[in-house]
């Protein structure tokens, strides 16, 4: 939000807190200990088996994971079987009198949904570190230390905001008496400092290769998703959970790259820092991820009416039947629920029945889903959830309803949140000097996708202007190389000797020029954010922008022909000042 020139809620209070206290983290820990008790271990430790399996690079390399065609393998300890059982005709106890074709279609759609943890994998890792950092006493809970160490083995930099970060292992290195206050068991407290040091070294040695492998796998997944969606746009609604999970996982991997590229904690031995393979942080894979993410975002927005119609039908027919069948299994449980939760459950079918109406607004449905999940997660319902199978099956169904409803009335917000890359655009060194510069050199057409994502994120206007300036220079350079090579080829056909390397230069420049022109021609309008009071919001039409660049280059090329003998086309000549006077006499045009 700072990148968008707006302050996040509470930002001034947090800033004042950091300024007033020399060690704000210690103060935060004291406040959380005395005033608030976050149930960090209770919430996250049960996810440890799923987190370990999902973080394994081999899991993401599996062809069935995040595939639009194959059901994904289940994560150990997940609720995937319960979610599948919620579908009528599945392996659970719920049955329906609906036609078998309709049931089998819903079964296939639910079976293709990825494990819910995948979409939030990056956030869960951050929650684990921040949770135990702010509430270190939670480390006394069984399994908490093992979970923290497992997460810390996958990172050695913890992002805070934009491109600001801290070193998580250093923050957990405390004096023995402080650790003893965190961890009640003496043996665990003694082992804790050694585990933290070992996890830092393991993260530095192995995490870069694991995350590079994850980025490469995601490039393949996004490519397959894009091909499937282009072949069958009507399937976007049924594959929406897979699409959103893949985009959110992509965002998490890009954020990890932003925070870790170029980072080398001084606590890591020098020989380890020198032995680090820098190619594991090659921005080319990040560039490819952003290209695919942009194309998928563009496709969803283009097919938004089709997606909304399909999602509305699914909500108002198939998912409504599933919800009614689940509720029919809960007469006794509903009576035991708090009155507010019972009221919310009774209102859900009404919202779903109206989902297929034209211009349906389902914000109220999502709010009720959020309120209901909160009520079911509260302590009074915990025992009831463990006892009632149908009530447990209701939770993944609620998540499904919320996601489908977003595809109906706010598809742009849905994909923009999944593609939000503010940390990348906030880091000029990582974005402009690594990703954007690499795209300019190797694949200029990717710069259009990067610009589109940057404008969608509402980045600062000066950054967009700088990107456009560099792209304009690269466009002119490719045009000059191509025209100069064509001129050399023409001179060779007339008997002159062509300069060495002219043909190779054109063969390298022409494909890049054609791809860049096609990308600009196909790009939708770019919304440029206002830059305070100095610059108003504007809309950039890439196709017209390209036409202006072509016209400018043509004028420069003609000027160069008029200034040079034999009509040879030179590189663009910029005439300083106003009127440069009449051109010299020439005999050939």
Image: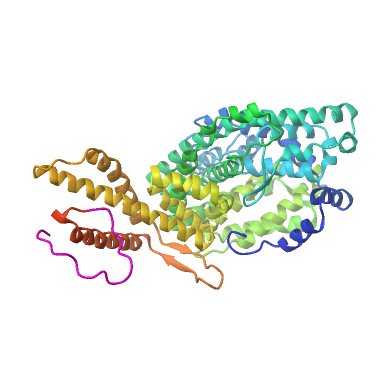
| 341 displayed left or right of 78 | right
**Magenta stretch: dominant SS?**
loop
Q: Give the percent coordinates (x, y) of residue 398.
A: 64, 49
In the picture, the quarter occupied by the N terminus is bottom right
Q: Give the percent coordinates (x, y) of residue 350.
A: 62, 60
Q: Give the percent coordinates (x, y) of residue 495.
A: 9, 42
At horizontal 58% and vertical 39% (from top left) the residue drawn is: 262
Q: Nearer the viewer, residue 113 or 506?
A: 506
In the picture, the quarter occupied by the C terminus is bottom left
Q: Give the percent coordinates (x, y) of residue 569.
A: 21, 53
Residue 60 vertical position relative to residue 544 in the rendered view, above or below: above
Number of numbered discs: 0
- Residue 320 makes an appearance in the image: no
Residue 28 vertical position relative to residue 257 in the rendered view, above or below: below
- Please say whether residue 224 is one of the residues in the magenta stretch: no
- Residue 367 makes an appearance in the image: yes
Q: Nearer the viewer, residue 51 or 473?
A: 473
At horizontal 47% and vertical 59% (from top left) the residue drawn is: 464
At horizontal 18% and vertical 45% (from top left) the residue drawn is: 488
Provide the residue span drawn in magenta.
570-589
At horizontal 44% and vertical 38% (from top left) the residue drawn is: 224
| 316 displayed left or right of 566 | right
Residue 30 vertical position relative to residue 504 in the rendered view, above or below: below
């Amino acid at each position: 939000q700072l990148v968008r020139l707006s302050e996040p809620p509470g930002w001034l209070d947090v800033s004042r807190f950091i300024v007033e206290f020399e060690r704000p983290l210690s103060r935060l820990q004291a406040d959380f200990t005395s005033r608030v008790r976050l149930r960090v271990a209770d919430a996250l430790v049960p996810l440890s088996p799923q987190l370990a399996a999902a973080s394994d690079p081999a899991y993401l390399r599996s062809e069935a994971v995040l595939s639009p065609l194959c059901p994904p393998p289940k994560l150990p300890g997940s609720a995937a079987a319960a979610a599948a059982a919620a579908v009528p005709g599945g392996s659970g106890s719920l049955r329906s009198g609906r036609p078998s074709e309709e049931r089998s279609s819903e079964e296939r759609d639910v079976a293709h949904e990825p494990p819910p943890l995948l979409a939030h994998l990056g956030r869960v890792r951050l929650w684990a570190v921040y949770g135990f950092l702010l509430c270190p006493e939670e480390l006394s809970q069984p399994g908490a230390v093992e979970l923290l160490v497992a997460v810390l083995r996958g990172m050695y930099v913890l992002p805070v905001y934009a491109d600001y970060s801290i070193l998580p292992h250093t923050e957990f290195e405390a004096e023995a008496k402080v650790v003893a206050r965190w961890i009640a068991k003496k043996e665990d407290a003694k082992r804790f400092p050694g585990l933290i040091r070992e996890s830092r070294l393991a993260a530095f040695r192995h995490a870069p290769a694991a995350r590079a492998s994850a980025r490469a796998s995601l490039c393949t997944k996004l490519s397959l998703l894009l091909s499937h969606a282009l072949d069958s746009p009507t399937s976007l609604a049924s594959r929406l959970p897979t699409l959103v999970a893949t985009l959110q996982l992509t965002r998490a991997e890009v954020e990890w790259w932003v925070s870790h590229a170029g980072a080398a904690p001084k606590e890591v031995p020098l020989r380890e820092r020198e032995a680090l393979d820098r190619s594991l942080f090659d921005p080319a894979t990040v560039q490819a991820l952003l290209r695919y993410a942009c194309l998928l975002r563009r496709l969803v927005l283009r097919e938004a009416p089709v997606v909304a119609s399909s999602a509305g039908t699914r909500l108002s027919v198939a998912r409504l039947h599933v919800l009614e069948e689940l509720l029919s299994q809960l007469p006794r449980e509903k009576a035991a629920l708090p009155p507010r939760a019972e009221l919310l459950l009774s209102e859900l079918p009404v919202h779903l029945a109206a989902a297929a109406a034209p211009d349906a607004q389902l914000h109220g449905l999502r709010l009720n889903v959020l309120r209901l999940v909160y009520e079911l997660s509260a302590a009074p319902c915990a025992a009831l959830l463990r006892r009632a199978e149908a009530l447990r099956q209701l939770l993944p169904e609620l998540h499904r309803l919320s996601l489908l409803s977003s595809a109906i009335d706010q598809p742009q917000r849905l994909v923009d949140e999944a593609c939000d890359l503010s940390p990348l655009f906030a880091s000029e060194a990582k974005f402009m000097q690594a990703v954007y510069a690499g795209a300019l050199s190797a694949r200029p057409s990717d710069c259009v996708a990067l610009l589109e994502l940057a404008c969608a994120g509402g980045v600062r206007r000066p950054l967009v202007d700088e990107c456009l300036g560099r792209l304009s220079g690269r466009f002119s350079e490719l045009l000059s190389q191509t025209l100069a090579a064509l001129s050399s080829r023409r001179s060779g056909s007339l008997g002159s000797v062509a300069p060495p390397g002219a043909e190779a230069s054109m063969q390298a420049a022409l494909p890049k020029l054609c791809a860049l022109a096609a990308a600009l021609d196909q790009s939708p309008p770019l919304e440029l954010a206002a830059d305070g009071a100095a610059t108003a919001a504007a809309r950039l039409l890439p196709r017209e922008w390209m036409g202006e660049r072509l016209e400018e280059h043509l004028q420069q090329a003609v000027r160069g022909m008029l200034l040079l003998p034999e009509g040879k086309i030179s590189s663009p000549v910029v005439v300083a000042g106003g009127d440069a006077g009449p051109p010299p006499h020439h005999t050939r045009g």
